[in-house]
Image (cartoon, rainbow, N blue to C red):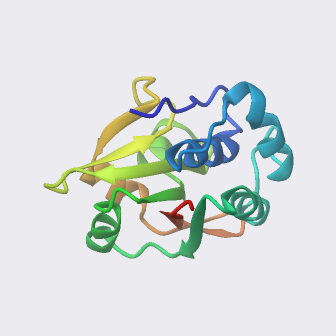
Amino acid sequence: MIRYAKQKNSSDCGPIAILNALKWAGVRCTYQSDLKKITEKSRCDSVGTSYGYFEKALRHFAHGNFTVTRKAWPGIAVFQKFLRNPDHAAISFFVDTDERKKRKKKSPHAMLIVGTRKTGGRFLCVNFPEYSRGKTAEWVSRGKIIAGHRPIRHLGYSYPSLWFLEKEIRK
């Protein structure tokens, strides 16, 4: 199994999602040697990063490793079908409903989703929100994925937003 990087502060979920997408795609990279340049490219600061800068950084680092297609939430069935292919993953930017119940401050979050069980009941999520028992990668229920992907407007952006990733064949 891939050794994914764990988010270490509350604002770098975007750069961590990019770093983990690179790891998923087979790129040799580490938290220590690569996170700083990803953070700089995505212009992540103490409050996080914006969609625009996140997407520019994602596309920059994806070049030659995987393709990136931005999509609106397609519904759980389409999402599951896409993730059944081991050469597919997705990055989700969302405002989790469970998180909104626990905190007054709404806080968007980015995570990498790398697969689904054949039954479709669980998704393998990397860097699921911080309250999730502290694991870097874990199987998350279909219900939690659906709950976290309900449409919401926050700080002028519509959530959720997804970037579908497809590994490129290396020559």
Report the side of 99 relative to 1 (left or right): right
Quadrant of the drawing holding the C terminus: bottom right
Residue 38, picture quadrant: top right
Q: In the image, what residue occupies the spot 70% across and 64% down?
A: 59
Q: Position of residue 123 (x, y in %)?
A: 31, 49
Residue 101, picture quadrant: top left
Residue 20, picture quadrant: top right
Observer able to see residue 45: no
Q: Position of residue 137 (x, y in %)?
A: 41, 34
Report the side of 37 relative to 61 (left or right): right
Q: In the image, what residue occupies the spot 34% across and 56% down?
A: 86
Residue extending furthest toward the front? 171
Q: Position of residue 97 (x, y in %)?
A: 43, 51
Q: Which of these two is toward me, 34 or 134?
A: 34
Q: In the image, what residue occupies the spot 80% across and 52% down?
A: 42
Q: In the image, what residue occupies the spot 38% across and 32% down?
A: 1
Observer able to see residue 23: yes
Q: Which of these two is toward me, 161 or 42?
A: 42
